[in-house]
Amino acid sequence: MKRMIGFIFFWIAVGMLIMLFIHNILIGFIIIGLLLLIGYNLFC
């Protein structure tokens, strides 16, 4: 369980770094939606 939480926190940090460089909010939301969809399909 600790490895899973660490993995999640790592990717949250990566996402925050990406959003620092993407200044367009719409593109950010599109990327977030796509990654959530892909992550859900891969996890379940």
Image (spheres, rainbow, N blue to C red):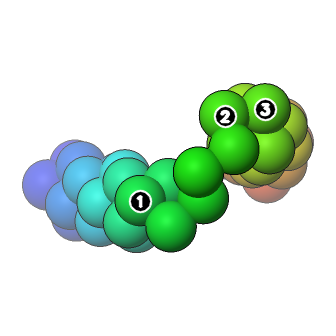
Quarter of image, res 27: top right
* Labels 2 & 3 near each other (Cβ < 8 A): yes
Query: In the image, residue 2 lies at what x, y percent?
Result: 14, 55
Q: Few, some or many C-alpha atoms within 10 Å of disc 3 (few <14, some 14-19, many ≥20)?
A: few
Which badge, 1 or 3, comes first in the chain's sequence?
Answer: 1
Mark 2 — residue?
A: 25
Q: Position of 29 compared to 16: left or right? A: right
Q: Residue at x 26, y 54 (%)?
A: 9
Q: Earlier in the sequence, mark 2 or mark 1?
A: 1
* Residue 20 located left or right of residue 18: left
The residue sitting at 41% across, 59% down in the picture is 20
Name the kind of residue labelled 1 in the image. Answer: Leu
Tell me, yes or no, whether the two marked residues, 1 and 3, touch with CB atoms within 8 Å: no
Toward the left, the furthest residue is 2
Cα distance, mark 2 to mark 3? Answer: 4 Å
* Secondary structure type for disc 3: helix
Q: Is residue 6 left or right of residue 37?
A: left
Picture disc at residue 20: 1
- Whether 21 is drawn above or below 40: the answer is below
- Above or below, 35 against 20 in this view is above
Q: Quadrant of residue 41?
A: top right
